[in-house]
Image: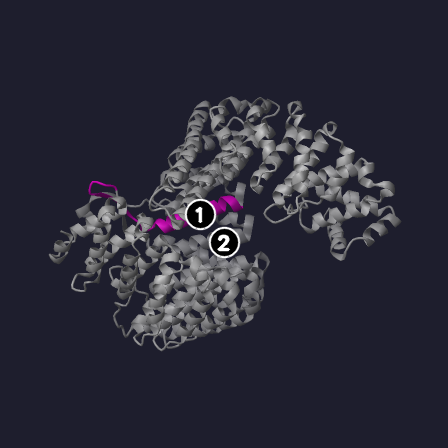
C-alpha cells in the first residue's frame, strides 16, 4: 500500500507511517527490516517528489529518536541511510548573486539540502557517535576531495551537523578535523568557504571551551583573514558570525594575548564597511562585525577599556543615522554592542557617553509606538535598557517611567492559538510562524510563534530590573506580579516559564519596603499558583526552577506564610514527587532488561536518573525552607513524608538518594531540635554508618549531620558524639582525604569535630583532640564550615586556651600561618564578623614585640602579605 500510494502521488500512507514511528515505534518491530528497506528505496527514488522522499527518510530519522536501541540493531539500514542524507545535501542550485547578496534569505525548509542536514543532525543525536561517526567519516572525506563545489559544501555542512551527536568521538580526532577544515577557508568557491566558516563556528560552540584552548591561535587568525575576503560579502559575514561563536565561549585569559590584533582587524573592517554602507548601502557584513565587537568586549571585560574610544564614536554615529527601515537590524545590533561595551568597561569609563547613549535610547523609545510589531530593534532595545540598568544601578530608576510601558506591552503579548484537524493544519502549514503539536484523533494544537521570543526577552528584563533596583522597583511590582503569576501556566515557551518562576522571590524582596501587609497580599496572589505549578508542570527543567523559587519565597516570607490548605496540597504534591522518584528508578531497571538495551540506552537512562535526582534536590530545598521557617511546629505535617524519606537512606539505595535523604534529616536536626530526637530511631544509625561511606557526597551529608547534632541536637544526642569521633577521624586521616573529590567531605568531618568540642565538650577529651584538630586547619573549600572553625579557633585564642597557645606561646607562628592560609584561600569574606576577630588576634600578637617578629619570620611572603591584607580589611 505504501509503495503504490507514493507512485499515485498520495503521501497519506507515508504520513501515517511517520506518525507510527513517532508515537508507537515498537509496533513496527515485527516488520521493521521490510519497512526500513522500503522507505530507503523511496527515499532514493529521484522520480518521487521532494516531499515524498523526505517523508520516507523521516520514518528512519523518527525511529532514531523514538526507538534508537531498536534501530541500532539494523546497522545495514543506517549505513545505507547516511549516504542518502548526504546525497540530499548535494541537491543545491547555482546562484550567481549568492556571494554578494545583502539580505539573508530564510532557509528553504522544503529543500532536500536542508532536510538532509537536519536528518543527519537528528540521527547523530539519536543513535550516538559511536555508531554514526565510523559510518560517515569516509563519505565526508571523499566529498571534501570532490572537484564539484556542491560535494565539498555538503561535506563541510555534514561535519557541522554531526558535532553535537558525535561529540565524544569527534573530540579524539578534533585536531585532524580542524586542520583539514581550515584549508577550505581558502577554497576557490565562496559557498565552500562559507560552509568552512559554518563548520568552525559550529565546532567552536559544540566543543567549547576545549576548542578555544587548543585552536585559539589558528582559528582566530584564519577567521580574521577570511573576514577580509572582499570577493564575497556572505563569506565575510559568516566568518564574523563564526568569530562570534568562538569569542562567546573563549576563556578571557586566552583571548587577551590576541586582543590588540583582533581589535585592530575588527576596527579596520568596520571602517571599510561603514564606507560601503554610505556609498553602496550594503550592511550585511557590518551587522555581523558590530556583533563581533560586542562579543569580544563581553569576553574580555575591563581589558576592552583601551579600545573604547576607538569604537564608541562610530557606533553612536550608526545609531544616530541608521534610521531607514532596511537598517533596523543594524541599528538594533549596534544598540546591543554599545550596551555590552558599557557593561564590559564599567560605569567609570562609560559615564562620559552614558548621557548621550541614554538620550539616543530615549529618542528611540519615544518613537516606540511607531515601530512595527516585528521590528528587530524592539528586543535589542529591551535588552539594552536592562544592561544600562546594570551599569547605572540606582541612577537608572529615573528612566523606569519611560521604559516600563513598552516593556510591559511586549511582555503581555498573547500568542494566537488554534485547535485544528489535520486538513486545516496542512492548509495553514505554509502560513508564516505556526508550529503544531499532534494531540491524537487527527487533531493538532497550533500556536503562532511570532512575538514569543520578544515576550521571553521582556520577561527576563523585568526580572533584571527587580534584581538590580530592589526597592527602587516597588512602584511596578504589583503590575508585574499580575502579569507574571498567570504565566506560570504558559506552556508554550519554557524560557517564559523559567523567567516567571525566577521572578517571584525577587518581586517579594522589592515589595518588602511597603510593609508586611502589602507583602502578604502579594504572596497570597503568588502562592496558590506556585503550588499548583509544582503539581502540574511536566518539564523537569522548568519544574526544578519553580520548586527552587517556591523555596526562596518561603525563606523571604518566613513563619506563617502557608495556611492549612497550602500545607495539605503541598504535602500531597511532595509525596507524589517522591513516589514518582522511586517508581522511575524501578522503570529504569525494567528497561535495563529490555532486549534492545545497550550502552547508549544506559547513557540516556543515566540522564533520566540525573534529572530525577535534580528534582529530589528541589524537594530537599522546599523542606529546608519550611523547617528553617516553621521549626518543630511543622513536624506533624512532615510525618506523612517520613516513610519515603526513611526509604531514601536505606543502604541499598543509590548514593544520591542517601545523600539527599540525609540532608533532609540534617535539616530536621538543625531546625527542629530537641523535638527531632523522636525520629532518631530512623536516621541516627544510618547517619553514623554513612560517615565512612564510599561516596564522598554521602560522607559530607553524614558529617554535617553529626556537626548539627552536637550544635543543636540537645541532650538526647550526647551519647552519639563520642561514637562519631573515631569515624570522623578515620575519614580525615585517610591518604586521599584532601583529593579534589573528597575535600568537602573531609572538611565537614573536621568542622563536626570542632562543633563536638565547642558544644558538647564533656562528651570527649577535648585536650587530647585539640592538637590534632589544629593540625587539620585551615578549611578553605567549604566556606560555611570554614567560618565555624575559625570562630571556634577565636573562642579558644580569646580565652587563652593553653593547649592551643602551647608552652610559652610556641604554637602562635603555626596559628598565624593558619589564619594567613585562610585569607589566601578567601575562606572567610571580609564583611563577616569573624574577620574582625581574627584581625584582633593578630593585632594582639603584634603588641608583643619579639614574639611578633619570630612569628612573621616563620611565614612565607604570600602569608605575610595575606596577614597585612587581613589587617587592612578589618
Q: Which residues are magenta?
A: 439-468
- Name the one closer to the observer, 706 or 791: 706
Q: Residue at x 49, y 23 (%)?
A: 639
Q: Is residue 458 magenta?
A: yes
Q: Which residue is mark 1?
A: 460
Which residue ends up furthest to the left in the rendered image? 8
Mark toward the viewer: 1 or 2: 1
- Name the one closer to the observer, 805 or 839: 805
Q: CA distance from mark 1 to mark 2?
A: 12 Å
Identify whether 643 is placed above or below 126: above
Identify whether 484 is placed above or below 104: above
Q: Which residue is mark 2?
A: 387
Is residue 356 shown to the viewer in this render? no
Is residue 145 shown to the viewer in this render? yes
- Please report whichever mark, 1 or 2, sits nearer to the chain's N-terminal start: 2
Where residue 583 sits in the image (x, y, percent)? 40, 34
Amino acid at each position: 500500500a505504501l509503495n503504490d500510494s507514493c507512485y499515485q502521488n498520495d503521501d497519506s500512507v507515508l504520513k501515517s507511517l511517520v506518525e507510527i514511528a513517532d508515537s508507537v515505534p515498537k509496533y513496527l518491530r515485527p516488520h521493521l527490516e521490510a519497512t526500513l528497506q522500503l522507505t530507503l528505496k523511496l527515499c532514493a527514488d529521484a522520480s518521487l517528489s521532494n516531499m515524498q522522499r523526505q517523508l520516507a527518510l523521516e520514518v528512519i530519522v523518527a525511529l532514531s529518536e523514538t526507538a534508537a536501541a531498536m534501530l541500532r540493531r539494523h546497522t545495514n539500514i543506517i549505513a545505507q541511510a547516511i549516504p542518502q542524507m548526504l546525497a540530499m545535501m548535494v541537491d543545491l542550485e547555482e546562484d550567481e548573486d549568492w556571494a554578494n547578496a545583502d539580505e539573508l534569505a530564510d532557509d528553504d525548509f522544503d529543500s532536500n539540502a536542508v532536510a538532509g542536514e537536519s536528518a543527519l543532525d537528528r540521527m547523530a543525536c539519536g543513535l550516538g557517535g559511536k555508531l554514526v561517526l565510523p559510518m560517515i567519516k569516509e563519505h565526508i572525506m571523499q566529498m571534501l576531495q570532490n572537484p564539484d563545489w556542491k560535494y565539498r559544501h555538503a561535506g563541510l555542512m555534514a561535519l557541522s551537523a554531526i558535532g553535537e551527536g558525535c561529540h565524544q568521538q569527534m573530540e579524539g580526532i578534533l585536531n585532524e578535523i580542524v586542520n583539514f577544515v581550515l584549508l577550505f577557508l581558502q577554497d576557490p568557491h565562496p559557498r565552500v568557504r562559507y560552509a568552512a566558516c559554518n563548520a568552525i563556528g559550529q565546532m567552536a560552540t559544540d566543543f567549547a571551551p576545549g576548542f578555544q584552548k587548543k585552536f585559539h591561535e589558528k582559528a582566530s587568525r584564519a577567521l580574521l583573514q577570511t573576514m577580509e575576503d572582499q570577493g564575497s560579502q556572505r563569506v565575510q559575514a559568516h566568518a564574523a558570525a563564526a568569530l562570534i561563536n568562538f569569542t562567546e565561549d573563549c576563556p578571557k585569559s586566552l583571548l587577551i594575548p590576541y586582543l590588540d590584533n583582533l581589535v585592530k582587524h575588527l576596527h579596520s573592517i568596520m571602517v571599510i564597511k561603514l564606507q560601503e554602507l554610505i556609498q553602496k548601502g550594503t550592511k550585511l557584513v557590518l551587522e555581523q562585525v558590530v556583533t563581533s565587537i560586542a562579543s569580544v568586549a563581553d569576553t574580555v571585560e575591563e581589558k576592552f577599556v583601551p579600545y573604547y574610544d576607538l569604537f564608541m564614536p562610530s557606533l553612536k554615529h550608526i545609531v544616530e543615522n541608521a534610521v531607514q527601515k532596511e537598517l533596523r537590524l543594524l541599528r538594533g545590533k549596534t544598540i546591543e554592542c554599545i550596551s555590552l561595551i558599557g557593561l564590559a568597561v564599567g560605569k567609570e569609563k562609560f559615564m562620559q557617553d552614558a548621557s548621550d547613549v541614554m538620550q539616543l535610547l530615549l529618542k528611540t523609545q519615544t518613537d516606540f509606538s511607531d515601530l512595527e510589531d516585528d521590528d528587530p530593534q524592539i528586543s535589542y532595545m529591551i535588552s539594552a535598557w536592562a544592561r544600562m540598568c546594570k551599569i547605572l544601578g540606582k541612577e537608572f530608576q529615573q528612566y523606569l517611567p519611560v521604559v516600563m510601558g513598552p516593556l510591559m506591552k511586549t511582555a503581555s503579548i498573547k500568542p494566537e492559538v488554534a485547535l485544528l484537524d489535520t486538513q486545516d493544519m496542512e492548509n495553514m502549514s505554509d502560513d508564516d510562524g505556526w508550529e503544531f503539536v499532534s494531540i491524537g484523533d487527527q487533531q493538532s494544537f497550533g500556536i503562532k510563534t511570532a512575538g514569543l521570543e520578544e515576550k521571553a526577552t521582556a520577561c527576563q528584563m523585568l526580572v533584571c530590573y527587580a534584581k538590580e533596583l530592589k526597592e527602587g522597583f516597588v512602584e511596578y511590582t504589583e503590575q508585574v506580579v499580575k502579569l507574571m503569576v498567570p504565566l506560570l501556566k504558559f506552556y508554550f515557551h519554557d524560557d517564559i516559564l523559567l523567567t516567571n518562576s525566577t521572578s517571584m522571590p525577587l518581586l517579594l524582596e522589592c515589595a518588602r519596603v511597603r510593609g508586611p501587609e502589602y507583602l502578604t497580599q502579594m504572596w497570597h496572589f503568588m502562592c496558590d499558583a506556585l503550588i499548583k505549578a509544582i503539581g502540574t508542570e511536566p518539564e523537569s527543567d522548568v519544574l526544578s526552577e519553580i520548586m527552587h523559587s517556591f523555596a526562596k519565597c518561603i525563606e523571604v516570607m518566613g513563619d506563617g506564610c502557608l495556611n492549612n490548605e497550602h500545607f495539605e496540597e503541598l504535602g500531597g504534591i511532595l509525596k507524589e514527587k517522591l513516589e514518582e522518584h522511586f517508581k522511575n528508578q524501578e522503570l529504569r531497571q525494567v528497561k535495563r532488561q529490555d532486549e534492545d538495551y545497550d550502552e547508549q540506552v544506559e547513557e540516556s537512562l543515566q540522564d533520566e536518573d540525573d534529572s530525577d535526582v535534580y528534582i529530589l534536590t528541589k524537594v530537599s530545598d522546599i523542606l529546608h525552607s519550611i523547617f528553617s521557617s516553621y521549626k518543630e511546629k511543622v513536624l506533624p505535617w512532615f510525618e506523612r513524608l517520613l516513610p519515603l524519606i526513611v526509604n531514601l537512606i536505606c543502604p541499598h539505595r543509590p548514593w544520591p538518594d542517601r545523600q539527599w535523604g540525609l540532608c533532609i534529616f540534617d535539616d530536621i536536626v538543625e531546625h527542629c531540635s530537641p523535638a527531632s530526637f523522636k525520629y532518631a530511631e530512623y536516621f541516627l544509625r544510618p547517619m553514623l554508618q554513612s560517615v565512612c561511606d564510599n561516596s564522598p557526597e554521602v560522607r559530607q551529608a553524614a558529617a554535617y549531620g553529626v556537626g548539627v547534632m552536637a550544635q543543636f541536637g540537645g541532650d538526647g544526642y550526647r551519647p552519639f558524639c563520642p561514637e562519631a569521633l573515631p569515624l570522623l577521624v578515620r575519614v580525615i586521616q585517610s591518604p586521599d582525604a584532601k583529593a579534589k573529590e573528597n575535600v568537602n567531605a573531609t572538611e565537614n568531618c573536621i568542622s563536626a569535630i570542632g562543633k563536638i568540642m565547642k558544644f558538647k565538650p564533656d562528651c570527649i577529651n577535648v585536650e587530647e583532640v585539640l592538637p590534632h584538630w589544629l593540625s587539620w586547619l585551615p578549611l578553605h573549600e567549604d566556606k560555611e564550615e570554614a567560618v565555624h572553625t575559625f570562630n571556634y579557633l577565636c573562642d579558644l585564642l580569646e580565652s587563652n586556651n593553653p593547649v592551643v597557645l602551647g608552652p610559652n606561646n610556641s604554637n602562635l607562628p603555626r596559628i598565624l600561618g593558619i589564619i594567613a592560609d585562610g585569607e589566601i584561600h578567601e575562606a572567610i569574606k571580609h564583611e563577616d564578623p569573624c574577620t574582625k576577630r581574627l584581625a584582633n588576634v593578630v593585632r594582639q600578637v603584634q603588641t608583643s614585640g619579639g614574639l611578633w617578629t619570630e612569628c612573621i619570620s616563620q611565614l612565607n611572603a604570600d602569608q605575610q602579605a595575606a596577614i597585612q591584607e587581613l589587617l587592612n580589611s578589618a
